Structures are given as C-alpha cells and as structure tokens.
Amino acid sequence: MFHLDTLSTLVAATLVLLLGRKLVHTVPLFKKYTIPEPVAGGLLAALALLVLKKSMGWEVDFDMSLKDPLMLAFFATIGLNANLSSLRAGGKVLGTFLIVVVGLLLMQNAIGIGMAKMLGLDPLMGLLAGSITLSGGHGTGAAWSKLFVERYGFANATEVAMACATFGLVLGGLIGGPVARYLVKHSSTPDGNPDDQAVPTAFEKPDVGRMITSLVMIETIAMIAICLTLGKIVAHWLVGTTFELPTFVCVLFVGVILSNGLALLGFYRVFERAVSVLGNVSLSLFLAMALMSLKLWELASLALPMIAILAVQTVAMALYAVFVTYRMMGKNYDAAVLAAGHCGFGLGATPTAIANMQAITERFGPSHTAFLVVPMVGAFFIDIVNALVIKLYLLLPIFG
C-alpha cells in the first residue's frame, strides 16, 4: 500500500489533467467523440492502478481531503455567477428542461424497479440503481442508503449505492460527447455554432484569456470561502427537517443570495472572470481526483444482475437524450449541448455535465442557453425534485 498525502495527491491530480489534455488532443478517438479531459486522464490512471493491483498486488491510497472542498468551491462559483435577471430571461427554457429532467427521473426508477423484480432482486436495489444514485450522485446515494438500512433493513444498501454512483459518474462522462456529436451533425447547424461576440458565461470557455488582478482574486477567494462556511451552517441547521438538503445545494444557494444581494444593494459586484477561473480549476481538480481514485476492482463486486440494470440505464439515458431532451429543447445546437449536459448529470453529477458541455463548446462553438440552464437545474432543482419522486415511488405497495 502506497499512501499519497494531500500535496502528493494534488500533484497527481494535476498530472492526470495534463495527461487527459494530451490524450484528447492526440488520440483521434477521444477527439472525435469529445471526451472531457479529466475523464480521459482520470480513467487511464484508474486503469493503470487496476493493472498494478491485479498484477503486482500494489495499491495506491490517495488523501482525498481536498476533494469535497473543491466540489463545494465549484458549486459556490455557480451560485456566485447566477444572475437572477438572466435566469428570469431564460425562464421558459429552464421550465421546459425541468419537465424533461422529471421525465428521466420517473423513467430511471421505473427501469430500476422493473428490472429488479424481473431478475428476482429486492425492489430497493432497483430504486438505488435508479434516480437515487444516477441522477442524485454519491451524496444522494449515501443519504438514501442510510434510510434504507435503518427503515427497510437493506443491509448492503450503502455499498450498492456507492458502486452504482461510481458507475454512473464514469458512463456519464463517456456517453455525453458521442451523443452530442451525433446530435450536432444532425441538427440545423451541423458545423456547430461559430464564435459570437457575446461575452462567454462563467464555464463556457475555460481556456479563454481573462485579465485578473491579485486583489480581485483575493476578493473572489473570500466570497467562495464565505459561501462554503455559511452553506455548511445552513446545511447543518436543516439536518433532520423536511427541508434537509445536501451541503453543496446550500453552498450554491448562499452564493446566489450573496452575489445578487450585494449587486442589488450596490455594495459589490462579483467579478465573473475571476469566479469562472477558480470555478474551472476546482471543477477540473475535483473530477481528476474522483476518477483517478476509482477502485475499479470494487466495481467487479457488483452482482451480474446489477451490472445488467446499470447497462440498461445507460442505454436508456442515451436514447432519452436523443429522442426526448434534444427534441423537447428545440432540435438545434443548444439542444444538442443540453443533451450532453443531461447525460452528465442524468448518470453522474453536475461537474460531469459541465465537463461534457465544455468539451462540445470548445469544438463546435458557444451555447449560452445550455450554460445558463444546466448548472441551476443540475445543481439545485434536481435534488429537490428527485427527493419528491423517490418519496412518491416509496409509497408503492411493493415497498410497504
């Protein structure tokens, strides 16, 4: 067992990102299907660790103490850059996308429960392989699996939830690019959307040059730190109440209130370019750490029926993105980018959705609508709606 401390893990994550960038720019397959750089590098690192484990019995233990703060910092930057007037302007698109998302949640749980029953498994396992872990991710999976253990006596709920969420994180990053590429080629603008003169939104163009002073960077770091601190306090207050929400949702919500409240008072206006730089750094490092630390040999412990359920869910997500998300959102370039984002958080998590969309827009051009809608729906509304859908399914007689 080789243990890497915090700084060594950070070095490894940066090397994984550089490796992913090199792979995407030199391997035609990765470039063709626009695989996000953290996914390419992180998966290769995880595969290398799998080979070391199986061939020589070596295992690398990473210090993941920075992983959660990086994720929370990313969501804080989404909140800080959420302009409420812009969200009002995109209200109709946001509402339509929310309806599309609810449809996927209902379908994922129906597939999970139906296949679990067909394969002779506990229906709760099917629910865990549905929207709880796929649209909800590791955090939602951990919360609900604890309930399943305590209330329903499902002993292995936590292990099943973590394995399903991990599987979803990987597949969400892999299918988004190919799905979007197919849709762009069949859209009204098969060459994408050439660069326009509008200022790119926070995460839309991670490589664009941004002039930022040291003072602005310090102010932005302070804002992010305030969001993390207050968000954790709010999340702690809500524990055990009807309004209990994951910490990252509370952090994002604090960011929205803070940036819009300060702007409304005329006291301070968030410097979006600095926020976007720090947000993209946090996003890339978080994804690299999450994927390079995957213990792929533990996924092999998933029972064959569970793998079958997850494989069907992956195919269903791709088909849903093509035939429902893309069509409902207007069958244009923006709809194709939205479909890539939906694959990201429909199987994995919001950071994966952003990475998917960045890979597409870097190649085919900007999509302001997608980067306005997906972060708010994928990071905020999804958890509230998902909780309601899960509770609705738990009212079914099979869970009585």
Image: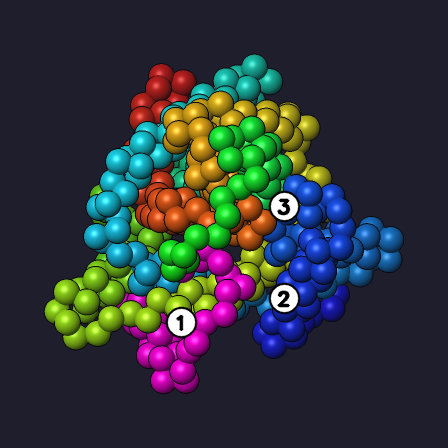
In percent of width and height, residue 195 lies at: 48, 52
* 129 relative position to 389: left or right: right
In the rendered view of the protein, which quadrant contains the N terminus?
bottom right
Residue located at (60% from left, 68% from top): 63
Q: Which residues are magenta?
A: 202-230
Above or below — where is 299 with respect to 204? Answer: above
Q: Amino acid at mark 3?
A: Thr
The span from disc 1 to disc 2 (Cα, nearest Å) is 22 Å
In percent of width and height, residue 148 lies at: 42, 36
Q: Which mark is residue 34?
A: 3
The span from disc 3 to disc 1 (Cα, nearest Å) is 26 Å
Residue located at (87% from left, 53% from top): 55
Magenta residue check for 91? no
Residue 99 in view of the camera: yes
Residue 313 in view of the camera: no
Q: Which mark is residue 274?
A: 1
Of 263 and 159, which appears nearest the observer? 263
Q: Amino acid at mark 1?
A: Ala
- Quarter-of-image position of residue 171: top right
In percent of width and height, residue 49 lies at: 76, 56
In percent of width and height, residue 285 lies at: 56, 64
SS label for mark 3: loop
Question: Which of marks 3 and 2 precedes in the sequence?
Answer: 2
SS label for mark 2: helix
Q: Residue furthest top?
A: 118
Disc 3 packing (10 Å; few <14; some 14–19; many ≥20): many
Q: Amino acid at mark 2?
A: Ala
Question: Which of marks 2 and 1 precedes in the sequence?
Answer: 2
Residue located at (43% from left, 76% from top): 211
Query: What residue is pinned by disc 2?
Result: 13
